[in-house]
Amino acid sequence: MKKIISTDEAPAAIGPYSQAVEANGTIYISGQIPLDPTTGKMVDGGIAEQTDRVLKNIQAILEASGLSLANVVKSTVLLKDIGDFKAMNEVYGRYYKENPPARAAFQVGALPLDALVEIETIAVR
């Protein structure tokens, strides 16, 4: 049985998908881009500001599930430019200070709304 997870504290989906879905105690969070949930617009700034917003969005979805970043077991980071990896990683490390999840990072051709970063996340209860 699956349960749809949604919160106004993270941006609404911009397509036919859910912010997150829970199945058998595992929460699958759709790829989050740096949209401000209040305005629905991309945040100003570069990769550091965008990564920070993405992780805040993920955190909000986790909190709506009754979880925290400590429950995250896997993240996939998609970057418009792999040259941004170091700056993204510095921000990412501030959110996952202890026992960070498994992670993969890739450069991709393009991201929705010309974002610099998108992160999808899997968490468990």
Image (spheres, rainbow, N blue to C red):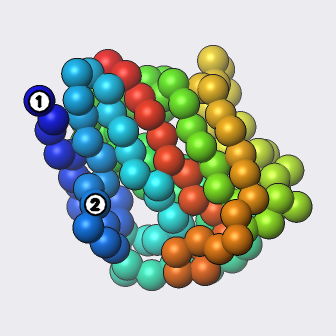
Picture coordinates of residue 97, whole percent (x, y): 67, 27
Identify the image quadrant of the C terminus. top left
Left or right of 105, for residue 39: left
Q: Residue at x 22, y 52 (%)?
A: 6
What is the secondary structure assignment of the residue under circle 2? loop
Task: Depth check: give the residue in front, 17 or 65.
Answer: 17
Identify the image quadrant of the N terminus. top left
Q: Is residue 63 above or below residue 53?
A: above
Task: Depth check: give the residue in front, 116 or 44.
Answer: 116
Q: Earlier in the sequence, mark 2 or mark 1?
A: 1
Crowd class of label 1 (few under 14; some 14 to 19; many from 20; radius 10 Å): few
Left or right of 122, for residue 17: left
Residue marked by disc 2: 17
Left or right of 113, for residue 71: left
Picture coordinates of residue 15, whole percent (x, y): 31, 72
Residue marked by disc 1: 1
What is the secondary structure assignment of the residue under circle 1? loop
Does residue 94 appear anywhere in the picture?
no
Marker disc for residue 89? none
Q: Residue at x 23, y 29 (%)?
A: 23
Q: Are marks 2 and 1 in contact (CB under 8 Å)?
A: no
